[in-house]
Image (cartoon, rainbow, N blue to C red):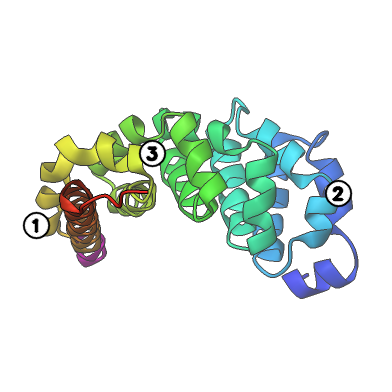
Amino acid sequence: MRAGGVLRAGLVPPLLLKLKTELDEIQELILETLSNCLRVEVSEALAAGALTVLKEKLSHPSAAIRSKAAWVLLEISSHAEGKIAVCKEEVIPALVSLLEDTEPEVQVNSAGALMFAIVTPQGRSSAMGAEAIPPLLTLVAEETSKARLNAIKTLTLLAELPEGRQALLDHRATFQRCLDDPSEAVQRAAEIAITDQHKRDKLIADELELVIDAAAWCSTEPRKVI
């Protein structure tokens, strides 16, 4: 049955329930089905407690299940209401912890889910609170191009926060090296990260100059005597 048929038949809530009891092999199939369905619509799944179930699966002994659960969370986070729910249910710290998973595919999918989830200010703050930058920088040096790509895009979003910019100041060379990456997608992501960083630096410098000019003007402006 295709995703549309599963959704129309109202099978998402029962599938989520089965994730709690089925054998690992069946759970993998369920997660694959859910990823296809939640790419289309997430409201019913969120109402049925999908995030609670999926958050538990992120710590499952099976790497395949951890990876597929992270992928389902990626699909959920691609929707506006999913981004809000993922942040509210504190799923982001769990995804950050998987950036250091021993399985590359788990790392890739977790970074991808984070990339979508932290588009909101609340998501970025949650990721910074979970100390996402160090493991993301480690992923930028990984052999897998998908890991590098997802990590660079996620770091670019985190750099929108003042504390994110500060944390990345000493790592510009990391992005510079990616300009020679074999993957064109990684090269483009690195170019965007570097360009955005330069733009933010210029904006901060301009704002600082305005503050200095205003302070100088105030110090020279004669005060009125009352």
Residue at (28% x, 43% y) in the render: 165
Q: Nearer the viewer, residue 93 or 164?
A: 164
Q: Nearer the viewer, residue 35 or 85?
A: 85
Q: Which residue is mark 1?
A: 180
Residue at (26% x, 49% y) in the render: 223
Q: How many marks?
A: 3
* CA separation in Å, label 3 and label 2: 30 Å
Whole-percent x and y of residue 154?
38, 50
Three-letter code, disc 2: Ala
Whole-percent x and y of residue 102?
41, 28
Q: How crowded is the residue under tag 3: few (<14 C-alpha within 10 Å), some, or many (20+)?
A: many
User: Left or right: where does residue 106 sit relative to residue 84?
Assistant: left
User: Left or right: where does residue 193 sit relative to residue 106?
Assistant: left
Residue 104's label in the rendered image is: 3
Q: Which residue is mark 2?
A: 48
Q: Secondary structure at mark 2?
A: loop
